[in-house]
Image (cartoon, rainbow, N blue to C red):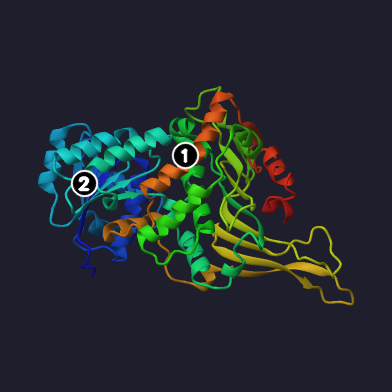
Amino acid sequence: MNESNLFDIVLFGSTGDLVTRKLLPSLYSAHIHKTINAKGRIFTLGRKDLTNQEFYDFAYAKISQYIDKIDKSSWDDFCKRIHYFKIEASTASDYQLLFNTLNHDVTNIYYLSTDPSLFKTICLNLANAKLNHPKSRIVLEKPLGNNLETSNDINDFVSKFFTEKQIFRIDHYLGKESVQNLLAIRFGNTLFEALWRRQWISSIQITIAETLGVGSRGAFYDKTGALRDMLQNHLLQLLCIVAMEPPISLEPDTVRNEKLKVLQSLKPFTEEMVLNNVISGQYKSGTIGGVNVNGYLNEENIPPNSHTETFVALKAEIQNWRWAGVPFYLRTGKRLQEQMAEIVIQFKDIPVKIFPFSANNFANRLIIKLQPNETVQLYFLAKQPGDTNDLKPVYLDLDFNKMFTNRRNDSYERLLLDVIAGNLTLFVRHDEQEAAWKWVEPILNTWKKLNYSPKLYTAGTWGPATASALLARDGVSWHEEIM
Ligand code: BG6
C-alpha cells in the first residue's frame, strides 16, 4: 500500500474527452498498480447534475472504450475514491462548497481540463474561495492561449494566485517513456556526446506523423491548426531535448534552463524565411490503410473555405556553438501515411571514400523512434560477403519493448504521478512557453498578412510535395523517401 503523498485531486471538465480518455484511465491504472496513495481522493467536476453512481456508469462506459477488460471489482474499488461534484465554473458560491469538501492538510491539485477560455475565471474563483493555499497545485492543459499575447495573458493571470512552483503546464510528450529515454540516451552515455554537434552532424529531422484526421475536434482544430496544436509545443519540446546542453542534474530548473537556452537560440523568422522555409498543407480525401477518408473540408464543423493547416514542415536553425549551420527539419501532420514519431540524426559523410559507393547507400544515421514502437537503429555500411568490396547499409536495431518487459506508464499517468509528488522536471516553465510562442509567432503573422493558403495533399501520403522540395534544396531527403 502506498502511503506517501496524500492528495485530493480536482478534475475540472470531468465529462469531457480528456478526463474520460486519459486522466481517469491513468488514475485507474495508478490505483490498480498501487502507485498512488490508497487514501487519495478524486473530485470530478462538471456542469451536469449527476449522482456519484451516474457519473461512475458514464465514466465506465467511456473508459471501457480505451482499456481492454476492466476488472469490475477493481473499478468499483477505484470508484470509492471518486466524488462527483456539480459546479458552474463561473459561480463563486460553488467554490465555497468545494472549499468545505477538500482536505486542506493534504496536497490539493486542480486540473483544468476545460476550454482555456475558462482558465482565468476558474483561477479567480479558486483564489476567492481561498483554495490557492501553499499546499495547492494547478495543472494547465494546452492550448494555453493561441498566440504570445493570449498565452502571456493567461500565464500572468494564473501567476497572480499561484507561484511558478505550483503551476504544472502539461505537454504530454514529456511524459512519454520514449521521450525520457531520449534524455537517458544522451546524458546517460558518453558514446554519443562527442559526436552530438555541428562538427559531426549534418542534419536532424524530427517528425510526428498521424494517420488520424481531426475527428470530432473540428471546431477546436479549425481555430488552432498544426503549428499551434503540435509544433509550438510537442515538436519544440523534442527539439529542446535533442539539442540542449547536458544539464548538471535532473532538478526541474536545471533541465528547464537548458531547454530555454535552445528556444532562445532559434534563429528568428523573417517574412522571407517563412516563405522559403515553412510549408503548410491541408489534407484532401484519400485512402489510409485501404479505407477511404474525407478531406479536411468535409470533416465535422469545418467551414467550407477553411485555410487551417493540418500539416506543417519547416527548417529551423539553432544559433549557438554546438549547432550553428545544422538544419533541423521539423514536420507534423494529420492523415499522413503512417502513425509514428521519430528523430533522425544524420552524421556527416566520410571525408575520403576508398570503397566503391552507390548512391542509395545511406549510412551514418541514427534513428530514434518514439512511437508506435520505441526503437533505436544505427545505420552504417558494412562489406557484403563476396569477392568484391561492395558495401551495403546495415543496422543495429534495439527494441525497448523486447529489452525491458516492465510495465510502461502512459504519459498522463507518469505526469499525474509527478504532479502528486510535486516534481516539475517534466513540465513546461512560463519562460519556455513564452520563448516558443515568440519564435512561432512570425509564421502566424506572415500567413495572416499574406492571406496564405496551405497546399493540398492527398490523405495517406507524406504531405505536400513542397515538403520534400524543402529538404531536396539542401540535398537531403525525409527518412522514408530513401528507405
Ligand atoms: C495533442 C494534439 O496534443 O496531441 C492532438 O492536440 C494530437 O491533435 C495528439 O492528435 C497526439 O498525441 P499522441 O500522444 O497521440 O502522439
Q: Residue at x 54, y 43 (%)?
A: 212
Q: Quadrant of the N terminus?
A: bottom left
* Res 276 quadrant in image: top right
Query: Residue 29, how many percent across, how many down?
Result: 34, 60
Choose between 246 and 218: the one closer to the eye: 246
As drawn, is 433 to the left or to the right of 54? Answer: right
In the rendered image, the vertical position of residue 157 relative to residue 34, given as above or below: above
Residue 175 in sight from this viewpoint: no
* Secondary structure of the residue carrying numbered label 1: helix
Residue beneath disc 2: 53
| Most distant residue in the right direction | 387
Choose between 32 and 343: the one closer to the eye: 343
As drawn, is 27 to the left or to the right of 303? Answer: left
Q: Which mark is residue 438?
A: 1
* Secondary structure of the residue carrying numbered label 2: helix
Q: CA distance from mark 2 to mark 1?
A: 46 Å
Query: Residue 406, how many percent across, how many down?
Result: 43, 71
Numbered disc in front, either 2 or 1: 1
Count of marks placed on residues: 2
Q: Which mark is residue 453?
A: none
